Image (cartoon, rainbow, N blue to C red):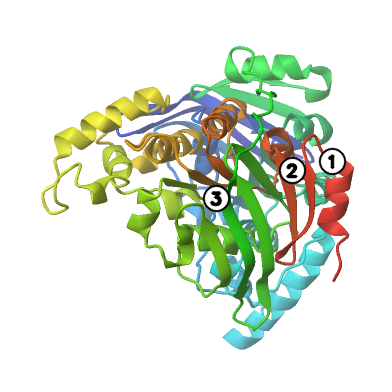
Amino acid sequence: MPAHALELSGIHKTFDGFAALTDAGVAVRWGEVHALLGENGAGKSSLMNIAAGLYAPEAGRLLVDDNPVRLAGPRDAARFGIGMVHQHFKLVGPFSAAQNVLLGLPADPEAPAGFGARLRAVREALRTQAAALGFSLDPDRPVDTLSVAEQQRVEILKALLAGARILILDEPTAVLTDDEARRLLQTVHALSRRGAAVVLVTHKMADVKRYADRVTVMRGGRTVATVDPRATPVEELVRMTVGETAPAAAAAPGAAPGPVRLDIAGLATPAADGRRVLDGLALQVRAGQIYGLAGVGGNGQPELAQALMGLPGAASGAIRLEGFGDLRRAGARQRRGLRMAAIPADRYGLALAGGLTVAENFGIGAAHTGRYGPVWRLRRGRMEADARRAVADFDVQGVRSVRQKAALLSGGNAQKLVLAREFGRDGGTPALVLAHSPSRGLDVRAGAAVHARLRAARDAGAAVLLISEDLDEVMALADRIGVIARGRIVAEFDAPADRQAIGQAMVDHDA
């Protein structure tokens, strides 16, 4: 049997003159879970995108089963049994989960004849595979109505049903609860023991220590080392990953909270099938407080975030902001004038336009104020000067010029750009901050920077609503924690809260 399922060596790759990978590589054996560690911008995703056929390397070798191969694209990679679940999903929003999976399946002469028959077969396969993974998924729901967690499940199922034997998972547990993550990683581990090769791109050291057979560390586009995670202390893995000790998260609580800044009462949103996604949700967030909303994905978190951001969607009830009234009647310009800051879960879909420059993505937040002149004749020099200051103030790495495309930024630095725009406005500290999974997919350092900004906003008097499916993040940041289930708040806790009690409330609520 070949020694390696997948091997990349001496890989070089540049983007717009910037060296993203320099002599990088990884060797993954059949029958193992191989973790890939590194900060955002270390080159992990670029290296795996080469393995998945999305990028072509400028130098280096790619071997499958110890044989050199050249991949012309993802379908070519699929022929060699390589499947990748990306951090930013590759799904067609209006299509159902089953239709998305069908699109990704290779040609099969033994498949049922006719589109309808094939789709029915995929539906059944989806239900079977989802049950095996412990997922609950409606194969007929349009993907763009699913939560981020549910969309990730579709991606995982799509890769497995396409027959991947070499499975690359980029931050697969980032939006899963503890139990979901445990079941998924147990399944991944079982797949490897049946002979599959699994690459686990993750920042969670506990997952590496528990499930990985080997770990390769990358930093600055280079491969640092490959070691046995069980024989390597966490402190040493962190040192190899960041080059120094990672910054410790601040643990000091905020001062006593002020008056109620955000008051949500009776919020309800119907789904296409007539059921209520939000079902009378009610919560209050005070000035100088971080209110953390914990819950299993698919219980109304995206719908709540959309209602607060003013995105289209029918909703009844009230969303009252101190000194204004019901936010549902406020447009986008009014919301920004009220000093609302929004950090959506999908940073590339809702917060940034990848095809626009860094300066344009930063400046668009103040374009309505006239700071840069009329929209048909923008003062680009002033916009670019503001963006350069913000990039420096918020430590946005990888910006060679504010005229470069935002799509070239790593996930952590893209999130820092969002923070720079939302928190760096002339109006000063935001009055209200909505942060939806703000550190999803970020490494330790980038996540700590995001958390520090949220704490600083709270300490300056902002009301912060943190919506996250990462219970560790909620418990680390929140002064008060609410549990959302079936579209309503089923329990609330003051910090410090008992993790087991929160977890119990997340899964053991009234029907």
Q: Label 2: how many residues lie within 10 Å, few (<14), some (14-19) or many (20+)?
A: many
Determine the CA span between mark 1 and mark 2: 8 Å
Position above or below: 104 against 124: above
Q: Residue at x 15, y 34 (%)?
A: 381
Q: Nearer the viewer, residue 422 or 11?
A: 422
Q: Is residue 88 left or right of residue 253?
A: left
Element type where label 3 sits in the image: loop
Q: Label 3: how many residues lie within 10 Å, few (<14), some (14-19) or many (20+)?
A: many
Position above or below: 456 against 122: above
Under mark 3, the amino acid is Ala
Lower sequence index among marks 2 and 3:
3
Location of residue 219 by image quarter: top right
Lower sequence index among marks 1 and 3:
3
What residue does disc 3 label? 345
Specify the farthest residue to the top: 244
Residue 49 on image: x %, y %: 51, 43
Residue 82 on image: x %, y %: 62, 50
Residue 320 on image: x %, y %: 53, 59
Q: Residue at x 37, y 62 (%)?
A: 331
Element type where label 2 sits in the image: helix
Q: Is residue 506 left or right of residue 368?
A: right
Position above or below: 91 against 397: below
Under mark 2, the amino acid is Leu
Q: Residue at x 56, y 34 (%)?
A: 458
Q: Residue at x 70, y 79 (%)?
A: 121
What residue does disc 1 label? 499
Q: Nearer the viewer, residue 287 or 239?
A: 287
Location of residue 239 by image quarter: top right
Q: Is residue 496 left or right of residue 56?
A: right
What residue does disc 2 label? 471
Q: Are marks 1 and 2 in contact (CB under 8 Å)?
A: yes
